[in-house]
Amino acid sequence: MTETGDLGFEPAVRTAFGFLVEEYGFRVAASSADRVRFESSGVYVEITSGRYGQEVGVECGRIGTDERFDLQSYLGAASAGLRDQVGDGIVDTPEAMRHCTAHLAEVLRAHGQPILEGNPSAFELVSPVSWAHFNLDAIGPAEYRERYRRELDAARAGLARLRQGPG
């Protein structure tokens, strides 16, 4: 097995997610062979990879709170089709690592403005969203499925309003 460092995780992440520093004023707060954490004054974006590089993931959160979520949850809450754009994040070669991190950064850049700017409403809308909201067939009683459907619909509607801006 190839370790994450051998796949070029850290330089791939710093390159792909450099827009956080350049466009949003984030800084690199922590960096290692399997984790790079960017922070602004109120928000963090943490990109991680398994020890052997199997999966790359992105977590966003508000500093000083319990509000956090993975990129897939945010995208799924933002729009039904966006979640599928992320893919599984599985990598096993340096080329796959560069491609995966570039793709994740591109998706975050294109759709993540409310969270990157630290909009409290975006975090409040998305933080409760979990795996269960996207896997309703795996949820037991119908009343739970309906509740999760309503919660996800409310998050999507709220995020749509945020993306439209004041008006």
Image: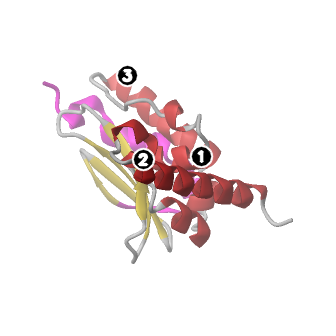
Q: Which colour scheme is used?
A: secondary structure
User: Does the residue at mark 3 contact the one at mark 1 (Cβ under 8 Å)?
Assistant: no
Q: Would you say 122 lies left or right of 50 here?
A: right
Q: Is residue 70 visible?
A: no
Q: Nearer the viewer, mark 3 or mark 1?
A: 1
Q: Residue at x 33, y 45 (%)?
A: 140
Q: Nearer the viewer, mark 2 or mark 1?
A: 2
Residue lying at the far right in this picture: please name it.
167
Disc on the earlier residue, 2 or 1: 1
Q: Residue at x 43, y 36 (%)?
A: 101
Q: Which amino acid does label 2 sit on?
A: Ala
Q: Position of residue 45 (x, y in %)?
A: 43, 57
Q: Is residue 120 above or below residue 111?
A: below
Q: Quadrant of residue 125?
A: bottom right
Q: Position of residue 159 (x, y in %)?
A: 65, 56
Quadrant (top left/top right/bottom left/bottom right) for the C terminus: bottom right
Residue lying at the far bottom in this picture: please name it.
64
Please tell me whether mark 2 sits on a helix, a strand or a loop: helix
Viewer-proximal residue among 66 and 117:
66
Q: Is residue 36 above or below residue 61?
A: above
Residue identifier under label 2: 142
Residue identifier under label 3: 95
**How many tags in the picture?**
3
Q: In which quarter of the image is residue 163?
A: bottom right
Q: What range of the chain is rendered magenta?
A: 1-29
Viewer-proximal residue among 158 and 26:
158
